């Protein structure tokens, strides 16, 4: 069975380079055309809104998950297919995890880094074996990757930590990789509780 849903972590701002929005739009369009449901943070602003709008414009389905306290800050997207309002950030991330077959990290800030490190850590702790892709648009993820490499060099992580995720340069490469992924039989229903 092929994957049917993809969680996307990305910025609630647009960032400083036009490539970020262009690749986010390309991702949303590609997910919608491929029939892959987008699971994301539920906002209507920044790159989050760009991805969601592009999925919807391509005829795809979008599941938004947003905590109540971010309702106004991230301007909740009222036009998505399904929208869940949670009590906390932890509940938001657990619900996104449970509804996704794979994870895609696009350009973003501290919130994106938080989600990325947590989902990689859950995989390291064998709470899941779902694939994680970091789309390194215009080198935006280089500092994040350097931090991981620094942890390995300083003896705080095994070299195998680099195998917990895959880095791709663009959306086209990502979509080729997603097209060949099988679903783990029990992965969708297991929610990490750390």
Image: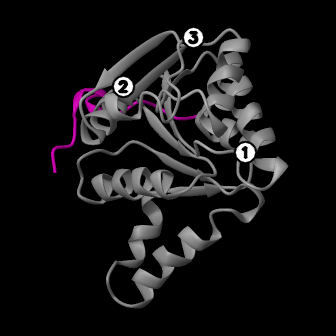
Quadrant placement of the N terminus:
top left
Residue 3 appears in the picture as rendered: no
In this view, the residue in front, 26 or 184, is 26
Indicate left or right for 63 with 172 as reference.
left
Q: Which label lies toward us, 3 or 2?
A: 3
Task: Please count the marks in the image.
Answer: 3
Q: Which mark is residue 79?
A: 3
Residue density around tag 2, few if under 14, some if 14–19, many if 20 or more, within 10 Å: many
Q: Secondary structure at mark 2?
A: loop
Whether residue 142 is in magenta: the answer is: no
Q: Main secondary structure of the magenta part?
A: loop
At x 57% / y 44%, what residue is drawn? 10
Q: Quadrant for residue 130, please give it.
A: top left
Circle 1 residue:
173
Residue 37 appears in the picture as rendered: yes
Indicate left or right for 135 with 187 as reference.
right
Please report the bounds of the magenta region as a residue range. Answer: 180-194
Residue 171 horizontal/vertical position (percent): 72, 41
Q: Is residue 43 above or below residue 128?
A: above
Residue density around tag 3, few if under 14, some if 14–19, many if 20 or more, within 10 Å: some
Circle 2 residue:
99
Q: Which label lies toward us, 2 or 1?
A: 2
Q: CA distance from mark 1 to mark 3?
A: 29 Å
Q: Quadrant for residue 192, please give it.
A: top left
In terms of sequence position, does the residue under pointer 1 or pointer 3 come before the other?
A: 3
Single out the residue that lies furthest toward the left: 193
Q: Secondary structure at mark 3?
A: loop
Q: Is residue 171 above or below residue 167?
A: above
């Amino acid at each position: 069975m092929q994957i049917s849903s993809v969680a996307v972590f990305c910025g609630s701002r647009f960032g400083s380079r036009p490539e970020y929005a262009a690749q986010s739009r390309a991702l949303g369009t590609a997910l919608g055309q491929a029939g892959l449901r987008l699971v994301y943070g539920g906002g209507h602003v920044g790159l989050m809104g760009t991805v969601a709008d592009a999925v919807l414009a391509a005829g795809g389905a979008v599941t938004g998950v947003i905590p109540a306290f971010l309702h106004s800050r991230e301007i909740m997207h009222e036009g998505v297919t399904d929208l869940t309002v949670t009590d906390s950030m932890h509940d938001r991330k657990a619900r996104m995890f449970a509804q996704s077959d794979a994870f895609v990290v696009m350009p973003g800030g501290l919130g994106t880094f938080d989600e990325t490190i947590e989902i990689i850590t859950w995989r390291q702790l064998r709470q899941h074996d779902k694939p994680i892709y970091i789309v390194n648009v215009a080198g935006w993820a280089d500092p994040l990757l350097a931090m991981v490499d620094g942890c390995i060099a300083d003896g705080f992580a095994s070299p195998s930590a680099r195998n917990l995720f895959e880095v791709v340069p663009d959306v086209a490469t990502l979509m080729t990789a997603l097209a060949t992924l099988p679903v783990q039989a029990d992965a969708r229903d297991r929610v990490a509780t750390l």
